[in-house]
Image (tube, rainbow, N blue to C red):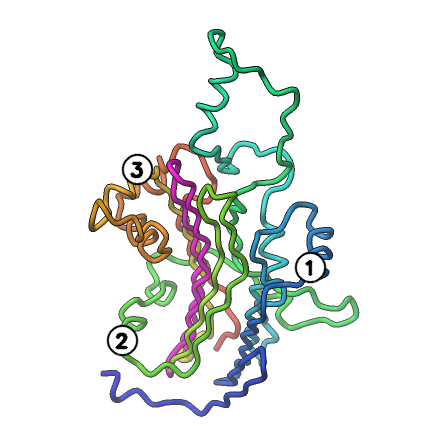
Amino acid sequence: MSSTVAVPQHKLSESPNSRAIEINDWVIIASTNPISSASECDALQASLGFPLPEMTFGSNYLSLEHQPSGWKMVFDTHNALKCVKKGELGEGDGGVKVGYADAWLKSRTDPGTNLPLPVTVTAKHYDWTYTMTYPGHHPDSAPDIELPSSSIQWMDADQDNPSHSIPLSELTRPDPILFYAEIPLFEDELHDNGSSNLLVRIRVMPTCIFILSRFTLRVDNVLFRTHDTRIYHSFTSSPSLVIRQLSGWEAPYDGVKRRLPSRNDLTPLTDAHFIAKVLTELPVTESQQIGARTRWRGLRTKVEIAVLARD
């Protein structure tokens, strides 16, 4: 029972733009800052080579470090946006056209139309939906420093080993939350054609660490798409290991809309939690195989582990 869960010794600290917890050999820092300034956006855009989302939180990040092994993982805006496809989209990139694009094009190419064709059409040399499968990253070490974590690699989980899966029963227990943070990395309204955003959440409880990094895409009248990165570590795991689950789903816009609690209330279609709930409750054949027929490579569920220390 959760009432018998012992709370381990831990230390909390806080500054104007960050909060941290030190617990069981882990140091976790969540930094939340205002939207990037114009000069910061200019520098980041120059580095990435494509226009930034309307709301870019370039200084936000979540970092966690296992001190005995030196293993460190970070979620931040710059590295997340590096995962957006630049250049022409190809097979597997999940390219999306807005709902009225085909009708717009047909009205200008139909032999019977009197509307003139545009002289030029400028193509976007990046994925305008900011679709990504960002799983977090490991910061590069200095060339002259050999981190112990350099030999720690992600490997496929053993499906027959219960310790290689995230225990949902533990995460749904009403255990005390010792540390919680929400770290927005970016949000964009796609020129009023929908919404694209990436939000990272972390919970530290007496028995474990749990992170959910969720990318949510809504393209009005076209599709919904979600990509989740879940990170889990049990303080009592033996050997000490981290579990990472990568999952992607999508479905046509109307398929999600039909599952609204009320046909006259479209508000849930702007709620990332509602969208994810609908997508994950659909049959796998619909949400991770057929999807919205974009052939996006992110449609999958993959579980992997990183062993931090062996007994």
Label 3's element? helix
Residue at label 1?
Answer: 38
Looking at the image, is mark 3 or mark 1 nearer the viewer? 1
Indicate the amino acid at tag 2. Answer: Arg
Q: Nearer the viewer, residue 19 or 57?
A: 57
Q: Earlier in the sequence, mark 3 or mark 2?
A: 2
Q: Which residue is mark 3?
A: 254
Check disc 1 and give the amino acid type. Ala
* Residue sticking out furthest to the front: 114
When asked about the image quadrant of residue 290, the answer is top left
Name the residue rendered at 25%, 87% in the picture.
3
The CA distance from mark 3 to mark 1 is: 38 Å
Q: Using the rendered image of the protein, determine whether residue 237 is visible from the camera's viewpoint.
A: no
Q: Is residue 231 visible?
A: yes
Q: Earlier along the polypeptide chain: callout 3 or callout 1?
A: 1
Say if mark 3 contacts mark 2, CB within 8 Å: no
Which mark is on residue 274? Answer: none
Please state the horizontal and vertical placement of residue 240, each as a whole percent of the image: 47, 74
Q: Which span is picked out in magenta?
A: 206-234
**Above or below, comparing residue 260 to residue 290 in the picture:** below
For the residue labelled by badge 1, is the local secondary structure a helix, a strand or a loop? Answer: helix
Q: In what element is the residue under mark 2? A: loop
